[in-house]
Amino acid sequence: MYVKQISVFIENTPGRLADFTRLLGDHQIDLISLSIADTTTFGILRGIVKDYDRAVDVINQAGYTACLTDVLTIEVPDVPGALAKVLGILSESGVSIEYLYSFLRDGGKEAFIILRTEQIDKAYETLKHNHVRLLSQEEVCAL
């Protein structure tokens, strides 16, 4: 139940992000989730889209550098401490998190978290064994 995430390197200059999102819009590519980490010279945009293969083709043809990464999407109760509990389960299993981000909060009921780890198989099995709900690509795209 891995989810494909696109990662795109974008120059950190005025208008570059607007140009990029316009490119996606012009090709009817909808960003379901979005996270940007930046430095002084460039940013890494990470996101989930429905048609990720087509998105990568469009993005690369436009001169950007894009790649796909497998991530996990989990659902946790939207209450204080819920994410800490899940992260504690992973930590106790020796799973290290590279990064994570929240992409949708369902009216205060559930929070959806995308996380990346080099130990994705171990993380998946650990979470599944501990009854943490993992969402499929289709489920994420339907939100």
Image (cartoon, rainbow, N blue to C red):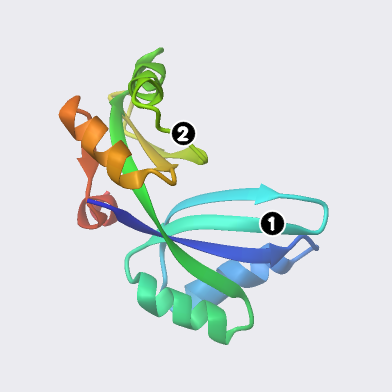
Q: Is residue 9 left or right of residue 86?
A: right
The amino acid type of the residue labelled 1 equals Gly
The residue depicted at 61 percent of the width and 50 percent of the height is 36
Amino acid tagged 2: Ser
Q: Closer to the N terminus: mark 1 or mark 2?
A: 1
Going by the image, does 74 lie left or right of 27? left
User: Label 1 vs label 2: CA separation?
Assistant: 23 Å
Q: In what element is the residue under mark 1?
A: strand
Q: Which residue is mark 1?
A: 43
Residue 58 position in % (x across, y down): 49, 82
- Asked where in the image residue 66 lies, by quadrant, the reply is bottom right
Residue position for label 2 = 96
**Residue at image location 50% in from the left, 69% down from the top:** 67
Which quadrant holds residue 133? top left
Residue lying at 39% horizontally and 22% vertically, measured from the top left: 83
* Near-viewer residue (128 or 20): 128
